[in-house]
Image (cartoon, rainbow, N blue to C red):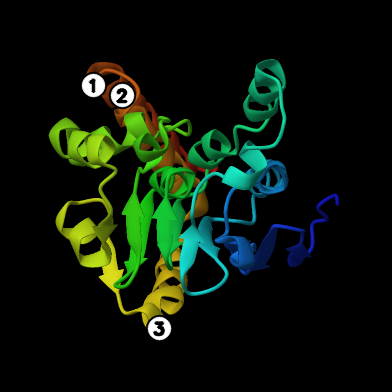
């Protein structure tokens, strides 16, 4: 199903709702633990392309249906279906939705309403800010299945909490509760389950209320801090500041 520039787009495994300047993307496979199947990956590629192109969207929330799972990771039933190595490689490389999420120009908020494991946790890690329900859990559990993360988990988690703690989570398949995730610096806030969605909406609305162009530049600069050396990042920061200052001047100045 092709996305239309409407307020609500319901797809098969996901949905997109835009209210004001905030877009909310909901994973909608609660009967399958919101696991990431190929349909979900394909739809998320569509959604991130669509949202990223909208100048009227200033903040994005990623959450999930139900109250037990945010996303249990890869759909292991689908992964066990007959498929050649070449077919699997082409399928997975054709839908790098987590990288599209990470590269969105708008700030992103993950509202982790339940278990976020494997690829589900990697989607949350690709967001700028993470809120978690007290009864939720997060973890990179791929090693327990004889696998390794494939959605950026081994790269983003150590940048977030340090390599020693990331190693403990990765090597042991350690799952952190909501309060533990907050204590470890994995998430920004831990709230009661019934308060999660309203807290995420309030935060995203506050972010979206900021001047749009400066907000988009601010995210670009934060992303650069993890990708380039300090000196070019500082130079880009000054260039952006000068651009925004010039924009503030009236045509008669």
**Lower position in the chain sequence, tag 1 or tag 3:** 3
Q: Residue 11, how many percent across, how many down?
A: 77, 59
* SS at mark 3 in the image: helix
Q: Which residue is mark 1?
A: 230
Q: Is residue 98 above or below residue 13?
A: above
Q: Is 245 left, or right, of 232 in this rendering?
A: right
Q: Which residue is mark 2?
A: 233
* SS at mark 1 in the image: helix
Q: Residue 156, how many percent across, how many down?
A: 34, 35
Q: Residue at x 39, y 48 (%)?
A: 128
Q: Quadrant of residue 9?
A: bottom right
**Marks 1 and 3: which is nearer the front?**
3
**In whole angstroms, how far apart are the C-alphas of marks 1 and 3?**
41 Å
Q: Residues within 10 Å of mark 1 (few under 14, many from 20)?
A: few
Q: Residue 226, how many percent across, how many down?
A: 31, 29
Q: Are marks 1 and 3 in contact (CB under 8 Å)?
A: no
Q: Residue at x 63, y 37 (%)?
A: 80
Q: Is residue 166 visible?
A: yes
Q: Which mark is residue 194?
A: 3
* SS at mark 2 in the image: helix
**In whole angstroms, how far apart are the C-alphas of marks 3 and 2?**
40 Å
Kindly give the residue lying farthest to the right in the view shown. Answer: 1
Q: Is 172 left, or right, of 206 in this rendering?
A: left
Q: Nearer the viewer, residue 15 or 238?
A: 15
């Amino acid at each position: 199903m092709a996305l239309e520039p409407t307020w609500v787009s319901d797809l098969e495994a996901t949905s997109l709702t835009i209210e004001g300047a905030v877009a909310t993307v909901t994973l909608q496979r609660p009967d399958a633990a919101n696991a990431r199947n190929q349909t979900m990956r394909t739809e998320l590629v569509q959604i991130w392309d669509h949202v990223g192109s909208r100048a009227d969207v200033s903040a994005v929330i990623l959450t999930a249906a139900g109250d037990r799972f945010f996303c249990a990771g890869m759909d292991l039933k689908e992964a066990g279906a007959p498929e050649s190595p070449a077919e699997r490689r082409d399928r997975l490389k054709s839908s790098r939705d987590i990288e599209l999420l990470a590269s969105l120009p708008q700030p992103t908020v993950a509202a982790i309403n339940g278990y976020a494991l494997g690829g589900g946790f990697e989607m949350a890690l690709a967001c700028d800010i993470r809120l978690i329900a007290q009864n939720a859990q997060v973890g990179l559990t791929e090693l327990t299945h004889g696998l390794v993360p494939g959605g950026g988990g081994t790269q983003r988690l150590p940048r977030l909490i340090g390599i020693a703690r990331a190693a403990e989570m990765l090597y042991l398949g350690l799952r952190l509760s909501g309060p533990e995730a907050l204590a470890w610096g994995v998430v920004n806030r831990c709230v009661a389950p019934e308060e999660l969605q309203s807290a995420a909406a309030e935060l995203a609305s506050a972010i979206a209320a900021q001047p749009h162009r400066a907000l988009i530049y601010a995210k670009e600069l934060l992303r650069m801090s993890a990708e380039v050396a300090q000196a070019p990042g500082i130079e880009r920061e000054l260039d952006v500041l000068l651009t925004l200052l010039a924009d503030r001047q009236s045509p008669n100045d």
